[in-house]
Amino acid sequence: MIKRSRFGNPIETEAIINKPEAVEFSSKRLIRTDNGFIINLSEKEMVFGLGENVRGINKRGHIYKSYCDDNPNHQEDTMTLYGAHNFFVLSDSKLGVFLDTPSEITFDIGYTKASEFRIEINKQDFDLYIIEGESIDKVVQEFRGLIGRSYIPPRWSFGYGQCRWSYMSSDEVRTVAENYEKNNMPIDMIYLDIDYMERYKDFTVNKDTFGDLDQLISEMKAKNIHLVPIIDAGIKVEEGYDVYEEGREKGYFCKDADGEDFIVGVWPGRCCFPDMLNSEARAWFGNKYKVLTDMGIDGFWNDMNEPAIFYSEKKLKEAFGKIKEFEGSNLGVDKFFELRDIFNRLGNSREDYASFYHNYRGQKVCHNDVHNLFGYYMTRGASEAFERISPDKRILMFSRASYVGMHRYGGIWQGDNKSWWSHLLMNLKMMPSLNMCGFLYTGADVGGFGSNTTEDLMLRWLQLAVFTPLMRNHSAMGTRRQELYAFEGTERFKKVLDVRYKLLPYIYSEFMKSALKNTMMFRPLAFEYTDDEIACHVEDQLLLGESIMIAPIVEQNAIGRTVYIPERMQLVRFKDGEVISEKIYEKGHAYVEAALDEVILFVRENRILPLSEGGKNVTETNFNDLSLIAFGDEIKPYEYYNDDGESPVKDDYDKYISVLSK
């Protein structure tokens, strides 16, 4: 059962595509307050959801804020990340709640008072959806039906991708490709960060370093490698730059209070933000991708679209004025910290977000009131343009910032993370909560984006990433090189990476079934084994699709780990190119060893895991001639989804299903 109640006069987000009629609010669980709701929690009640966020799968015990934020240094005390995903489920009552508003929301889930879940909504204009179901899975499926089908990328994007800020020239890209080939390591994508552009200007190419980009694209495609460039949210203010000139002439940029183009500092320096909420401006911006698709590019990633702001001109001027006051002063502790913070406070200022405006459906709207929609609508604009530019082919698209609804137009990566073991574990825990909100094509920057990774962290992270739909190794400028061939143990990386291509038929099939049936690809054990109290509190193991459970190693120097087996399962080990079906475990705890060059998983009784022989890339991987792993006396046939991986997906699910039996 789904009920929608309306409060105030909410801004239309278009997160919901199947909107029920509004009814008067009534709920046994949600108690209305002046600025939100209170939910009384039982001692053992769990709260799942909220998409991209820190901490556990069960969200109890912390405060989370729904406000898209550029925060690469997120730790346990962080409250905001890159996405705003206001959907959660209460375990006791199997009750789902979605708060549809682009306004900031604070979710205090047993932090201030352990038995209370307090929701505070910044503006009292929102739609509230309450979903009741017989299980958490059913509640999630009902919600996913409300918000629409998840984005489906091309099949080649399920391969391994290599990225770094930045590959500085065409020749460096060629060197990366050559090194993967020389080491016989599979690869499908090489990403281009901001330095492929001319002075960081969107939809331009640096002629000095990437002047032969069209030729490079052709060379890479001959190797079945796709180049995937970045597109940022800010347009450089520069006379003669056609994108800027057009946007200014047509009035497509966000405005300040006086109606002038709002100027901020981002990568190129002084920039304007295209008004992504203005449908005409959004279509105009989306059409600009054609500059690159015409060259043969068939994948993109949108970045800096919270939107990230380095500074506004007004606040920068104030900062320079303030600095002069400190000249010649005796800088004691208070003065020193005040001086240090003057420039630290320039970035992503709430004051700046409150000082520019959008033209949304003919109305002047303050950005701060629709902040969480910016990245969503930027990616929507690109996706809708791809339907015009390339109607017969899927285009890869994923984004940093997002709101529920954007899941229909692109995937996300889990933000700019760090080379920390804690962020490896966070990658695992974030997968199911993102799936709950419709984001299926997702994964984290493998090995960590910031900081210097280590060889063992990189290997362990790769062992998780072989299961995630988006598998991208990405690192920041100034950090240690973390291409897989850059480490001493190159052969170990090859062994782990090869496993990905053996798993591809299963990963792609389970992804497609999740997208087309509105189900979750990654599920906590608590969703399946609801009467098993131990399983309900396991947070470092996940069910992946219908057949397997994953339990990656996420601790430094560990040679194995304790695994909770919630039902009869068989350990499968990928070792030295072999797939080894090992011990069958009964329900209970078990210690399982796994070397740095091994991947382990557990197959559920009477379920089938299809595997390929692997390949150098997705194109050369055989999705038809499969080996099947299974055990048990009543093995359930497996519905295997296998399409061409490129054509747009229609409502013809059965056409691509074959039944695998053993």
Image (cartoon, rainbow, N blue to C red):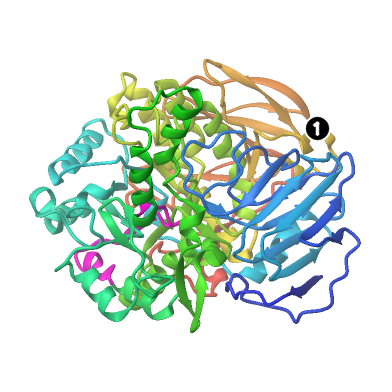
Q: Give the range drawn in magenta.
A: 288-312
Image coords of residue 231 (percent x, y):
32, 58
318, above or below 261, in the image: above
Examine the structure image and report whether residue 300 is included in the region drawn in magenta.
yes
**Position of 63 compared to 242: left or right?**
right
Q: At numbered mark 1, what does the secondary structure look like: helix, strand or loop? A: helix
Q: Which residue lies furthest to the bottom in this view?
A: 362
**For residue 115, what is the image quadrant?**
top right
Image coords of residue 512 (percent x, y):
53, 60
Q: Callout 1, which amino acid?
A: Ile
> Where does the N terminus fall, quadrant-wise?
bottom right
Q: Which of 639 and 134 is in front in this view?
A: 134
| Residue located 39% across and 52% down the image | 315
Q: Which of 492 and 17 is in front in this view?
A: 17
Examine the structure image and report whether residue 316 is included in the region drawn in magenta.
no
| Residue located 34% across and 56% down the image | 313
**Position of 587 compared to 264: left or right?**
right
| Residue located 71% across and 43% down the image | 59
500, above or below 33, in the image: above
Image coords of residue 5 (percent x, y):
78, 74
Image coords of residue 634 (percent x, y):
74, 46
For the image, the number of numbered tags is: 1
Q: Is residue 552 visible to us here? A: yes
Q: Is residue 647 visible to us here? A: no
**For residue 161, what is the image quadrant?**
top left
Q: Nearer the viewer, residue 112 or 149?
A: 112
Q: Which of 552 and 362 is in front in this view?
A: 362
Give the residue number, with chain letter if any, for mark 1.
Answer: 534
Decide: few, some or many residues near mark 1? Use Cα within 10 Å; few <14, some 14-19, many ≥20: some
| Residue located 84% across and 35% down the image | 533
